[in-house]
Image (cartoon, grey):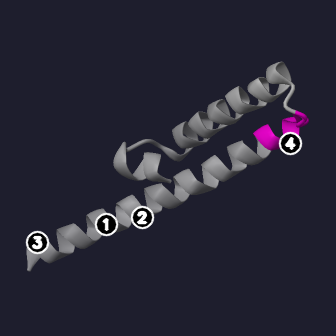
């Protein structure tokens, strides 16, 4: 959500970044054999969470813009 709020990224860009981070973490779990299991479900949940967080950030960003515009008109 912070990525879409402060970096002006779209919801899809935010979801792709979060999926990329999850992919790196899953890859490290597989390579380093930390006793954890790598699964595609974690990547799907990371994408879904990134998409929802990005959409929430975009909505908040738009709401802040409209509030700033309405206060400057007064």
Q: Position of residue 18 (x, y in %)?
A: 61, 39
Question: Can you identify the residue that label 4 sits on?
Answer: 41
Magenta region includes residue 36: yes
* Cβ–Cβ under 8 Å for marks 2 and 1: yes
Whole-number angstrom distance, CA of label 4 to CA of label 1: 34 Å
Classify mark 3: residues with Cα within 10 Å, few (<14), some (14-19) or many (20+).
few
Classify mark 1: residues with Cα within 10 Å, few (<14), some (14-19) or many (20+).
few
Classify mark 4: residues with Cα within 10 Å, few (<14), some (14-19) or many (20+).
few
Classify mark 2: residues with Cα within 10 Å, few (<14), some (14-19) or many (20+).
some
In the picture, the disc for residue 72 is 3
Q: Quadrant of residue 8?
A: top left
Whole-number angstrom distance, CA of label 4 to CA of label 2: 28 Å
For image coordinates 71% across by 49% down, the residue present is 48
Q: Quadrant of residue 46?
A: top right
Asked if residue 30 lies left or right of residue 15, the reply is right
Q: Position of residue 42 (x, y in %)?
A: 81, 42
Whole-number angstrom distance, CA of label 2 to CA of label 1: 6 Å
Q: Quadrant of the C terminus?
A: bottom left
In the picture, the disc for residue 60 is 2
For image coordinates 47% across by 57% down, the residue present is 57
Relative height, residue 20 to residue 66 (above, below): above
Under tag 1, what secondary structure?
helix
* Among numbered discs 2 and 3, the one appearing first in the sequence: 2
Question: Can you identify the residue that label 1 sits on?
Answer: 64
* Among numbered discs 4 and 1, the one appearing first in the sequence: 4
Asked if residue 73 lies left or right of residue 19, the reply is left
The stretch of residues the image draws in magenta is: 35-43
* Cβ–Cβ under 8 Å for marks 1 and 3: no
Whole-number angstrom distance, CA of label 1 to CA of label 3: 12 Å
For image coordinates 26% across by 72% down, the residue present is 67
Whole-number angstrom distance, CA of label 3 to CA of label 4: 47 Å
Q: Which is closer to the viewer, label 4 or label 1? A: 4
């Amino acid at each position: 959500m912070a990525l879409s709020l402060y970096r002006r990224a779209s919801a899809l860009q935010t979801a792709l970044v979060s999926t990329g981070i999850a992919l790196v973490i899953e890859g490290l779990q597989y390579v380093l054999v930390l006793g954890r299991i790598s699964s595609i479900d974690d990547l799907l949940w990371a994408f879904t969470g990134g998409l929802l967080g990005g959409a929430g950030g975009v909505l908040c960003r738009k709401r802040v813009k409209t509030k700033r515009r309405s206060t400057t008109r007064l």
